[in-house]
Image: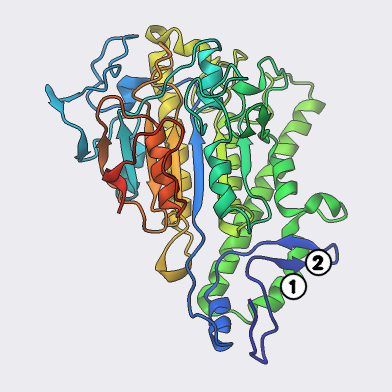
């Protein structure tokens, strides 16, 4: 993007070089750049990029807290196996219905106009491998069960990479894969800890370490003389700010503060770890408090989407079936194995409900953050993103693959209509949702995996 304005040299919104180290920092949308472009004879506004993101829940969820009408179901019976939703004693037909915010979904109430609960979508389990392994690794797969002949998994290029082939070609990273699994005992195969795949047998490995992710996104590793990227950028940023409108200066400050906040949190975590080492205090194989870890990884995903580092990202909030006890500071009173808890729900139901609600609250926190980030044409980052919360199991106890828990948020650049509970008819494949999302991103395909059509209830 360039301008003939004598007071403003050509500037690219997406890439702004700062500091003698040449660190590349991507910038959020700023109206001043648009105005400069218009002064040069260009378009006054341009459509913001469309983004796609996923917030994946391992080991399923506790149905009685998540699904409307299942609060009184006995454990561990699976209530959704026939995709029949009953509410207040009545069977509810497929279609669009008012949103009901169950205890687990309650944090989403504040974002009710920009989310849709989707129930009744199914997957087919291909026998021959572990149910948890297929749960995560095949959640976004582009092939139908038994279609791949040389693999025990119905696994090929996943939805994030299929979408990135179209909407991720102009960003520094076509996709970003994150996982909140910082255990060092890699006791499971790659199929339990990755949901993103280039193709059959070719994993796109998820990153787990926040500092390494930060270094990769913002290139600070090559500039070890400087601690923070914001310190590197401040000199050039001040010169840039003189050319911005008052509103853009405020937005610019907020953007830098968001990055600075992440840096401060990582520094605080690093200090905590050093102090524990000096004091010889042993902890489980966790790198930092669980809630802080998940929030930080989510913030890194949002800043990457905001800045244009990537348009496509996945975040697993934990690995499938991992038996190592995990600390859930501030949520549970002692370390637990989430997977083991799901297989003894009568004993652990209250703790499982707490974790499910925390995960939904963490997702909601990211939605609020994204909805506060202004982009072109009066829209927000959330408006231009399709952000899906979901699990590959309809129930963590019984390993059911049908009636999956799914929440779709955002707007897909105005291509989705949300704010409702979409209840699908029996036998509707999950792939119908993925095909719908591809169409919303402007990617035309007739089918996707075992899809039978799209979900017209959320299409504009």
Q: Position of residue 274 (x, y in %)?
A: 78, 33
**Mark 2 vs 1, N-terminal side:** 2
**In this picture, residue 313 sits left or right of residue 371:** right
The residue tagged 1 is 236
Q: How many numbered dots are placed on residues in this image?
A: 2
Q: In what element is the residue under mark 1?
A: helix
**In this picture, residue 270 sits left or right of residue 447:** right
Crowding around mark 1 (Cα neighbors within 10 Å: few <14, some 14 to 19, many 20+) is few
- Residue in the picture at 47% in, 53% down: 370
- Residue in the picture at 55% in, 12% down: 130
How is colour applied across the structure in the image? rainbow
Q: Position of residue 269 (x, y in %)?
A: 69, 38
Seen from the viewer's position, the closer of residues 152 and 286 is: 152
- The reply to whether dot 2 and dot 1 touch (C-beta < 8 Å) is yes
Q: In what element is the residue under mark 2?
A: loop
- Residue in the picture at 34% in, 29% down: 121
Q: Is residue 88 visible?
A: no
Seen from the viewer's position, the closer of residues 29 and 138 is: 138
Residue 309, numbered label: none
Q: Quadrant of residue 289?
A: top right
Relative to 193, residue 409 above or below: below
Seen from the viewer's position, the closer of residues 17 and 42 is: 42
The residue tagged 2 is 19
Q: Position of residue 178 (x, y in %)?
A: 62, 37
Relative to 387, residue 185 above or below: above
- Residue in the picture at 68% in, 14% down: 187
Crowding around mark 2 (Cα neighbors within 10 Å: few <14, some 14 to 19, many 20+) is some
């Amino acid at each position: 993007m360039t301008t003939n304005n004598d007071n403003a040299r050509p500037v690219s919104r997406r890439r702004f070089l700062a500091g003698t180290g040449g660190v590349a920092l991507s910038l959020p949308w700023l109206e001043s750049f648009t105005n400069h472009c218009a002064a040069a004879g260009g378009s006054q506004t341009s459509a913001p990029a469309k983004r796609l993101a996923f917030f994946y829940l391992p080991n399923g969820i506790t149905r009685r807290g998540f699904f409307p009408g299942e609060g009184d179901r006995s454990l561990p019976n699976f209530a959704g196996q026939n995709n029949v939703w009953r509410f207040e004693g009545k069977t509810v037909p497929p279609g669009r219905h008012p949103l009901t915010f169950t205890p687990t979904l309650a944090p989403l109430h504040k974002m009710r106009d920009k989310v849709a609960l989707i129930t009744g979508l199914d997957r087919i389990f291909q026998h021959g491998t572990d149910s948890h392994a297929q749960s995560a690794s095949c959640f976004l797969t582009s092939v139908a069960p038994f279609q791949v002949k040389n693999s025990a998994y119905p696994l090929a290029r996943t939805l994030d990479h299929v979408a990135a082939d179209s909407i991720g070609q102009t960003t520094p990273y076509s996709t970003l894969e994150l996982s909140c699994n910082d255990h060092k005992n890699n006791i499971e195969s790659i199929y339990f800890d990755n949901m993103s795949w280039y193709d059959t047998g070719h994993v796109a490995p998820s990153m787990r370490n926040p500092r390494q992710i930060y270094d990769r996104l913002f290139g600070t590793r090559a500039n070890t003389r400087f601690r923070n990227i914001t310190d590197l950028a401040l000199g050039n940023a001040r010169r840039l700010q003189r050319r911005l409108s008052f509103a853009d200066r405020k937005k610019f400050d907020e953007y830098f503060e968001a990055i600075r906040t992440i840096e401060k949190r990582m520094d605080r975590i690093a200090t905590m770890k050093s102090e524990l080492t000096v004091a010889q205090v042993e902890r489980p194989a966790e790198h930092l408090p669980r809630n802080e870890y998940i929030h930080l990884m989510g913030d890194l995903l949002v800043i990457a989407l905001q800045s244009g580092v990537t348009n496509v990202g996945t975040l697993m909030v934990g690995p499938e079936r991992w038996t190592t006890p995990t600390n859930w500071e501030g949520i549970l009173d002692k370390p637990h194995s989430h997977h083991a808890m799901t297989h003894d729900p009568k004993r652990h139901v209250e703790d499982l409900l707490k974790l499910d609600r925390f995960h939904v609250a963490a997702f909601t926190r990211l939605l609020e953050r994204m909805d506060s980030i202004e982009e072109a044409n009066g829209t927000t980052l959330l408006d231009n993103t399709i952000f899906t919360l979901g699990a590959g199991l309809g129930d963590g106890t019984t390993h059911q693959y049908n009636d999956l828990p799914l929440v779709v948020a955002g707007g897909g650049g105005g291509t989705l209509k949300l704010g409702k509970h979409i209840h699908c008819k029996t036998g509707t494949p999950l792939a119908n949702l993925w095909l719908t999302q591809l169409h919303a991103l402007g990617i035309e395909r007739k089918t996707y995996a075992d899809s039978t059509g799209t979900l017209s209830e959320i299409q504009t």
